Amino acid sequence: MGMIGGSTNAFIGAVHRMAAALDGQIELVCGAFSSDPEKSKETGRALFLQKNRIYKNYEEMILIEKTLPENERMDFVSIVTPNFLHFDPCKLALENGFHVMCEKPVALNLVEAKALESIVLKSNLVFALTHNYTSYPMVKEAKAIVKEGKLGKIIKVIVEYQQGWLSDKIEDDGQKQALWRTDSSKAGISCCVADIGTHAENLAEFVTGLKIKELCADITSFVEGRELEDDANMLVRFDNGAKGTIIVSQVASGEENELKLRIFGKKGNLEWLQSDP
């Protein structure tokens, strides 16, 4: 595995490295860990990588790795950068024959996402997003319960994802994670929905096997002066006629990472909580 982003002072890089190491089948062999070459070098050294496999930027990494013997080069690349740095690294990696594991959301906007889709469909490469909650054993069990028809026809789906870490305007204090998530030039058109709403939507569709066909959204920036939304309430309609609600917030004071899924069918219901997985 190669990695783009995820320096030692980043939020999610270490989490991805730990997850990749869980089954002992993935080895981190190279990386371009920061737009700052010195930070990239520092991170690579801390991870005990070979000096010549610590790269100054992602372009250098992808192009040099491509020239290495097949049994030495990275097999796939993990991209853990902010939203605005998803498209270009993904595109370059795919065009040079590397499988991609990318942080969500897939890109900064729909145009970029469609462009990546076009490249992937013309290749034999794997392109995956880290919708990690679908890998919990009980989430997979919930999916099986629905698929086997034990709940009957699904008629209602409710997903809540509540966080409170953006309740204050911490981006003004230079908090790194808040700075880019609340900046449209780096996060895109959305903060809260793109950051955690994507998990809620994915969980609803993954477990039920249904697709959202229509939605009505009420999005709000509760923190004064914040450019992008920090709270959203959505009514959704699924392709089987089921109705649902998706409630996401990053200004839910007192909540750390509260994700909850409830599914109601004509014969029964189920509930899953990430806090008690």
Image: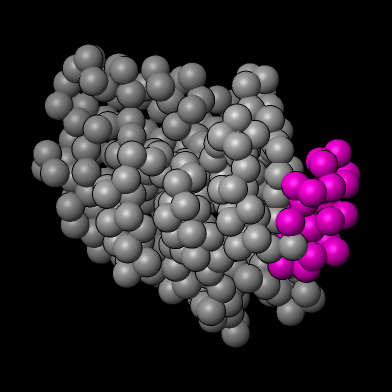
Q: Is 49 part of what is drawn in magenta?
A: yes
Q: Quadrant of the C terminus?
A: top right
Q: Residue at x 37, y 22 (%)?
A: 142
Report the side of 10 relative to 238 (left or right).
right
Q: Residue at x 38, y 41 (%)?
A: 125
Viewer-side residue, 227 vs 126:
126
Q: Quadrant of the N terminus?
A: top right
- Residue 276: image location, x then y, percent: 58, 26
Q: Is 154 part of what is drawn in magenta?
A: no
Viewer-side residue, 86 vs 222:
86
Viewer-side residue, 33 vs 84:
33
- Residue 174 lies, with reference to residue 131, above or below; the image says below
- Residue 67: image location, x then y, percent: 59, 48
Q: Residue at x 68, y 30 (%)?
A: 27
User: What colour scheme does the image use?
Assistant: one colour
- Residue 251 lies, with reference to residue 139, above or below; the image says below
Residue 229 can be seen, yes or no: no
Q: Quadrant of residue 36?
A: bottom right
Residue 132 can be seen, yes or no: yes
Question: Which residue range is magenta in the image?
Answer: 33-55
- Residue 31: image location, x then y, percent: 70, 49
Viewer-side residue, 139 vs 268:
139
Q: How many marks?
A: 0
Q: Quadrant of residue 261?
A: top left
- Residue 244: image location, x then y, percent: 26, 46
